[in-house]
Structures are given as C-alpha cells and as structure tokens.
Amino acid sequence: GQPLVFDMSYEQHMSSHDAKNTVSQLLQCEGWNRRSVDPFHLHFCNLQPNSVYHQELLKRYGQETWERLFITTTSQRHVDIFPRENLVYLTADSPNVLRTFDHNKVYIIGAFVDRSAQSGVSLANAKRLKLATARLPLNEHLQWDCGAKNLTLDQMIQILITIKETGSWEKALEFVPIRKHGGFYEQKTENSVFIRFHQWYE
Ligand code: SAM
C-alpha cells in the first residue's frame, strides 16, 4: 500500500493529556485504515522508545496486538526513510493547496493534538526539513469564513482514505464536521437536504 506517515515528534509541544488524546486518535486512525478497501501502509516515524506515546500505545493495544498491527514504527525520521522529493507535509498553515491527491507521494500528518492551537508549529518543522507542504482544499470547497481549520487525526485519515479511493473532494470533505462550516459551495448539499426533507413529508 501507499505509505502514510504520522510524525510522532511533537510530544514536547503537548500536555500529557493532549498526548494521550493523540494516541486515542491514532487508534481510531488505525481502525479506519484497517477497515478501508485499500489501506495505507502506516508509518509512525520519530517514535522514541519509552516516550509517552510509545508507553501509551503499548498500554492501549497490549503488547501482542501492538506487534501484530500493520504499522511500521521507527525512531528514524521520515526524511531518513523516504526520498525527500516524495514527501509532502500536510499542514493547515501551508500556503499551498492540495488540489489533487497524488498516489506516488508520501503524505505526512503531524501526530499532534493541541487544544491551545499553536499555529504554524508543523509548518515550521516542515520548512526546517525543506519539505513540500500542502493544506487540504477546505476554503475551496466549503463555506468557511472563520474558525480553526485544523482537523483531528481521525478526520484527516478518513479524508485521505476517501480522496484516495474516489478522487472526489466532495465525498472526502464530508468528514469535516458540519458544525465547522456552512456547507459545500456546490448545490449538492442543499439539494440532498431538500430531497430528504421532501421524502419525509410524502
Ligand atoms: N497547531 C498544530 C500544527 O502546528 O500543525 C495543529 C495540529 S492538527 C490538530 C494535527 C495534524 O493534522 C497537523 O499537523 C496536520 O498534519 C494535519 N492537519 C490538520 N488540519 C489540516 C488541514 N486543514 N490541512 C492539512 N493538514 C491538516
């Protein structure tokens, strides 16, 4: 399968509560991925032995399950494993928009949950490593004037699984919670709401 990297290098930016929350989201990601038609080959990079992440992953899965999972875990950096030109760091703060999903690229997601929303942390990290960056085309497809555009890790993987399978941003971005935006720009959302409404009353 196409590799997908979770960058586990943000532990020092998080409270232990947020680090544990990150692990919960990673468990959900692994589940969504495993049940998908064409799973990504997940790589947890920069995973340090005895880090809070590592201990928490072992605790939550149990040693046996953890070792059987289809996840490659390593303390190495993504840039030491994959050719730099194949890597694209996904970050909401990127000036570049991901318009089409490329099946030959290796996308990186920051394993990073911050309720304090420290903006630009993963962008700075990607720039330091001289990696290409991209943000999801949220403004381009959703009516979304204000509010944080940072999505959770499970939303990110569901979007990537769907765009990979269907090539449709309209389908993929259905995983953005509706409370975050005012609907799709296309007519479709309105129509389907209307149709549902109509059927209800017939
Ligand atoms: N303040 C954090 C930062 O500096 O990235 C936000 C972390 S966000 C909750 C977790 C990860 O999901 C990010 O590191 C990024 O890889 C990915 N992500 C979230 N929203 C995104 C978006 N709109 N576009 C691209 N990547 C996004």
Image (cartoon, rainbow, N blue to C red):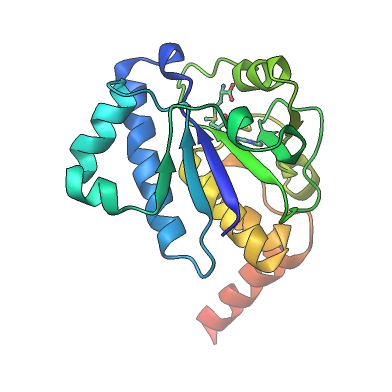
Residue in the image at 62% along x and 68% along y: 193
Determine if residue 148 is in view: no
Residue drawn at x 58%, y 40% as measured from the top left: 180
Q: Is residue 171 above or below residue 22?
A: below
Residue most toward the bottom? 202
Q: Tell me the quadrant of the picture where the C terminus can be found.
A: bottom right
Which of the four quarters of the rendered structure image does ligand 1 lie in? top right
Viewer-closest of 186 and 76: 76
Q: Residue at x 53, y 56 (%)?
A: 40
Q: Position of residue 26 (x, y in %)?
A: 39, 41
**In the figure, is residue 30 to the left or right of 188?**
left
In percent of width and height, residue 140 lies at 80, 45
Q: Residue 168, percent across and down?
A: 72, 63
Which of the 4 quarters of the picture holds residue 187? bottom right
Q: Quadrant of residue 170?
A: bottom right
Count of all numbered marks drawn on residues in the image: 0
Task: Estimate the x, y position of residue 3 in percent, counting from the top left.
Answer: 58, 49
Residue 92 seen in the current view: yes
Q: Residue at x 47, y 19 (%)?
A: 10
